[in-house]
Image (spheres, grey):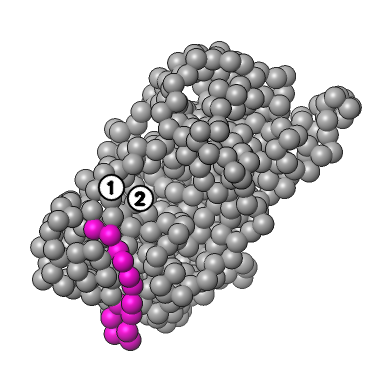
Amino acid sequence: MRTGYVWSDPEVTLADHETQVAIVGGGPVGLGLAVELGRRGVFTVVVEKTSEIHHIPKGQNLTQRTMEHFRAWGVEDAIRAARVMPRGHPAVGVNAYGNLMGEYAHPWFRRSDVDEYYFTSNERLPQYLTERVLRERIGEFDCVDVLYGVAAEGVDQKPAKAYVTTSAGTIEADYVVGCDGSRSLVRERAGIQEWRSDHDRRMVLLVFRSRELHDLLENRFGQAAFFNVLHPELDGYWRFLGTVDAAENWFFHAPVPSEAAADTIDPQALLRAAVGSDFALDVDYVGFWDLRIAIADHYRQNRVFIAGDAAHSHPPYGGYGINTGFEDARNLGWKLAAFIDGWGSEELLASYTEERRAVFASTAKDFIEAFIEDDRAFIKRHDPLVDKQDFERAWEERRLGSTRAVNVFEPHYEGSPLVTGVSGVSSAVGFHTRLARPGHHLPPPGGSDGVDWFGALGNDFALLAAGGDDSTADFGKAASALGVPLAAITIPAEAMERYGSSLILVRPDHYVAWSGDETADADVVLRRAIGR
């Protein structure tokens, strides 16, 4: 029986509870998945062991694609209203050699460079504020229950059901999704193995306040959000710090010895090494984390799925973590809902691992590990104290190539079994274009017609066609026969010309399933898009 409540009293005993989907972990990814399922009418229970939100700043860089998720989930305005940075503050970083006061520094990772290829712009917000917005949104769904202060203790499954044992009782579900972090209980109990990279370093996290540092760096670099410092002694790893707000709050990460502890850390010395100057500060938090890259062998074991850090984890290099997790939630959410509604297939559920695992493997290899290896090679080959001319030439090449990561980070599903009309490998490496390409995110059509194209796409499959084109009828018949919700959307001919196609089939997560013309076999295209 459903009650539609948000529960935060750990003393209350949970009677045996039945639901369609049980989510273990009510962090940002678990909450995002619950919103995706809730807006599709899927009965969902979220189990989260903590009642309070931890105010440790992380997961702050929200990409344009993540903001598209938030628009779809009905929280974009609330996210932007919660910002702690001034409107328009650039989400740009600085790369420096030696320290931030040295002579070698250049801009890095300007997310705004690819704004035109998305329906909304990026944002910067601490994870705890993002969670607060998502918690409020969850309360608007009668089909979603959230149990704060209730810990998951076990996960089991049988052919017809899966079960989550909690500190307050047992939840019976059709499916269980583990969004419970890198040390996932769900992953472990499901018997899903994970691969770990050789990168394994102990890192310190400092959260501190310093208005003096804010003024110092703004006077030197103008407005910037985060700062990465290379140093020969770090072997390619970074000392990096960033702003939490525009006032005085900061975070800082740095490699430390494996035996380091809170009482052996000198925050002032660590920050002096990174910044190159002393400044007044007040430390609010000292913690540690392990820098490693890990990925699960697969993201599903029968009725149990994993998402977010439970499926993959990596250091916060480039801000991929929380954004990758939200994309997991969007991808898995519509597929679970489709299967539960009866028009999805087992192959559709299987495609979650096929699409999302390939993209993260590429993200780890082609971006995160590449950052570390490229930096390691750079500091070994070039030293301004040995050959200044050689160093400055190489540093200038790095500056000129500093936008590469943003421009070529374009996750796509070209290797997906759901996509028609392209042969390739799903990857995080691509390029941005206005063309509507099968397996790729649908960009806005461009132009200044004032139409809310994103809103027109809706929550289900959409078929885009030029005005006056009646070739959508075959797709409508095929969708009706398969029970697939499909919206036919007429857009101006000039917009379709910019897309490079006369017909475009868009998935519920706004990736292109197929693009072509009226000669296509609508039934074949649509069947493939839903895994049949």
* Cα–Cα gap, marks 2 and 1: 7 Å
Q: Reply above or below: 241 against 53.
A: above
**Which residue matches tag 2?**
28
Percent of width and height locating residue 68 = 38, 48
**Which residue matches tag 1?**
134
Percent of width and height locating residue 195 = 59, 65
User: Where on the picture, by quarter, is residue 344?
Assistant: bottom left
Q: Residue reaching furthest bottom?
A: 159
Label drawn at residue 407? none
Q: Is residue 125 left or right of residue 280?
A: left
Q: Which residues are magenta?
A: 150-162
Q: Is residue 474 left or right of residue 309?
A: left
Of the residues shown, which amino acid type is indicated by label 1?
Leu
Residue 4 among magenta residues: no
User: Where on the picture, by quarter, is residue 427?
Assistant: bottom right
- Residue at 40% in and 65% down: 185
